[in-house]
Every structure is written in structure tokens, then in C-alpha cells.
Image (spheres, rainbow, N blue to C red):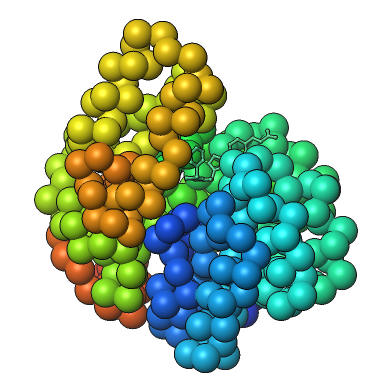
Amino acid sequence: MLKTRICELLNIEYPILQGGMAWVATGELAAAVSEAGGLGIIGAGQAPGEWLRQEIQKIKKVTKKPYGVNVMLMSPHVEEIMQVIVEEKVPVITTGAGSPGKYIPMLREVDTKIIPVVASVALARRLEKAGVDALIAEGAEAGGHIGETGTFPLVSQVVDAVEIPVIAAGGIYDGRGLVAALALGAEGIQMGTRFMCAEECTIASEAKEMIIKAKDRDTVVTGRSTGHPVRCLNNRFTRSFAELEKKGIEPSELEKLGAGKLRLAMVEGDVKNGSVMSGQIAGAITKVEPAADIIQDVIGGAEETLRRLQKCR
Ligand code: TUI
């Protein structure tokens, strides 16, 4: 019942992808998710190619199962990251913050599956025509850099617009969310925020604790004036950023202010002055647990949800 075209395409047991979060999704986390039957994804973020090569080696030491790399297309190192992906014959890539169109031919040569994140129907249509394998429709409930449309309306409309499989992302953390995504016509889910609280996730404990303490209304979106809206947990950093944004500070100055703040929170553990990117679902996450337990909880919860729905007929 929970087998979809995504399981077949990616050669994975469960249709669950782990978000490829910059400074968060290292080889350790991705290996644990892949070994547990989902698709673990390294977040290349703005890292150089050699960093990515090391993280890939970490995965290969732990598991023979498929894994992915997320390419942040605004990265200054995007060309060398793509080069490493081709050299290492990475099985799957996801992309974010742009269109991967020009890289499709080089990736095709090594049979890397290409799954862009889209935040609009227009880009979904364009990328299907360009020959990508599947799409992740990520709603504005997600953490980090987001679009404008919520997950329900975005997934419903993307599914109707394309033939290739669609993965739903943004606001999903359990089996109910997986079943809801399948009901909308998606064939898998991607979860970021919940996997930040996996035991194998190497981020600072302060960042995990902040997610666990968060309530439903604790995320905010900053950076709309820069053209790069970002959802994170409300803190001293977001408050000062929002104040400057309200004063009409130049977008380029604001971008400079944001530089390095994700690393500050996730690696240094300064969750007051750093940017704790997180989805709206943070309020539902209650504990740190192994990645395998997260996957089993989602699958078990989905089966239970399907049984409950059967009784409504
Ligand atoms: O990429 C993400 N999430 C991210 S990237 C990131 S690093 C960053 N930090 C500060 C500013 C900007 C980025 C942190 N979180 N998610 C996937 C995603 N992609 N969300 C939205 C999009 C997107 C947006 C516009 C994809 C394509 C697009 O338009 C491209 C086009 O050509 O139309």
C-alpha cells in the first residue's frame, strides 16, 4: 500500500526523503536515514566540492543503499558541487532555490536521478518538459528558503499539472501527513524539521532543544524584501532582522546581515543570534530519537491512519 513510483524510481523501501538541509544534513544523518529504508540526503548548501566528497565517503562506509545530495543552486560553488556529483556517480540529486535545467545533460550521463524542489506550478511544468525524474512540491510551511503557496494547494495543483511522480514537503512529520500527501496524489514525502531532531543529526544540541520547545506559532518569515523569504524560529536574530527590514534597509545590506547565521545556530549552537531555520511543524516535535525510529513511526502511523479511514466508509 505504501509502495509508490518513488520507491521504484529511487530503489528505496519507504517513500520518505530526508530534507537536504545546509549545515544540518551531513553524511552521518543521510547514512542513518538511507540505512533505515528512506532516502538520506546530504545538504551541500554553500560548501565546496571537497567537503561534499568527504560526506559521500561517510555514507559509503555505513551503507550500500541509495542516497542523495541536495544542491543549493544559489551557491557560489554550484559548478564544483555538480562536478563531484558526476565523478562520484551520486544516485539522486534534489535541487533548491532555483532551476537545475542547465545541469540536466551532465547528470543524465551518469544516470543520476534529478528531483528539483519547486514552489510553483509553472516551474513544475517547465522542469517536467526538461526531463527531470520527479518533483518535490514544497509548501510555505517548510523551513528555510520558501515560496508563497501552502503545501495543500501547491501539491494538489502540481500533481494535476504533471505526469511524473510528486513528493510533498512542508509541514509533514508523521503518518497522518504521509497519508494526507498520498490522498492529494503525491507519491512520497520529504521531512526536514523532524530529521533535525534525529539522534544522528550532528547539529548543536541547543538547536534541537529549541525545536523541541517550540510551539505552533513560533516560526517567522524574514527576508521577503530581499526576494529570498526564509522561515526560522523567532529569536533575537529574526527580531533585529525584521526591524531593519521594516526600516527599509537595502536588500543587499540585509543579505550581508544574514550571512553565516545558519552556521552560527546549527554548528556553534548560538540559537539567540543565529538563524534556526525550521518548519511550522516544529511545535509537534517532542523528542530526539534515532532516524530509524522516526521512519518506523511515520510508516506505522500511516498504516494506523489508513485503518482508521477504512472505518469511516
Ligand atoms: O532551498 C530550499 N531551502 C533552503 S535553501 C537555504 S540556503 C539560503 N539561505 C538564505 C537565502 C536563501 C537560501 C535554506 N533553505 N528549499 C527548496 C526551495 N526551492 N524552496 C523554494 C525554492 C525555489 C524558489 C524559487 C525553487 C525555485 C525557484 O524559482 C526558480 C525559477 O527559476 O523560477
Query: Residue at position x 79%, y 47% from top?
Result: 101
Depicted 183 relative to depicted 196: above or below: above
Residue 311 location (% of width, % of height): 26, 61
* Residue 125 visible in the shown view: yes
Query: Considering only vertical position in the picture, is 278 above or below 79?
Result: above
Q: Residue furthest left?
A: 213
Task: Decide which of 27, 141 is in the foreground and name it.
Answer: 27
Residue at image coords 20%, 68%: 288
Question: Residue 238, how many percent across, how many down?
Answer: 28, 30
If the picture is divided into quarters, which one holds ligand 1? top right
Q: Residue furthest top?
A: 247
Does residue 67 appear left or right of residue 86 in this picture? left
Q: Nearer the viewer, residue 222 or 281?
A: 222
Q: Name the image quarter holding residue 224.
A: top left
- Estimate the x, y position of residue 15 in percent, counting from the top left: 50, 69
Q: Residue at x 16, y 65 (%)?
A: 287
Name the one closer to the observer, 98 or 51.
Answer: 51
The image quadrant where one finds the C terminus is bottom left
Measured from the top left, where is residue 179 in percent x and y?
Answer: 39, 58
- Classify residue 68 by image quadrant: bottom right
Left or right: residue 3 compared with residue 140: right
Q: Residue at x 59, y 69 (%)?
A: 52
Query: Would residue 308 be seen by someone viewing this image from the given angle?
Result: no
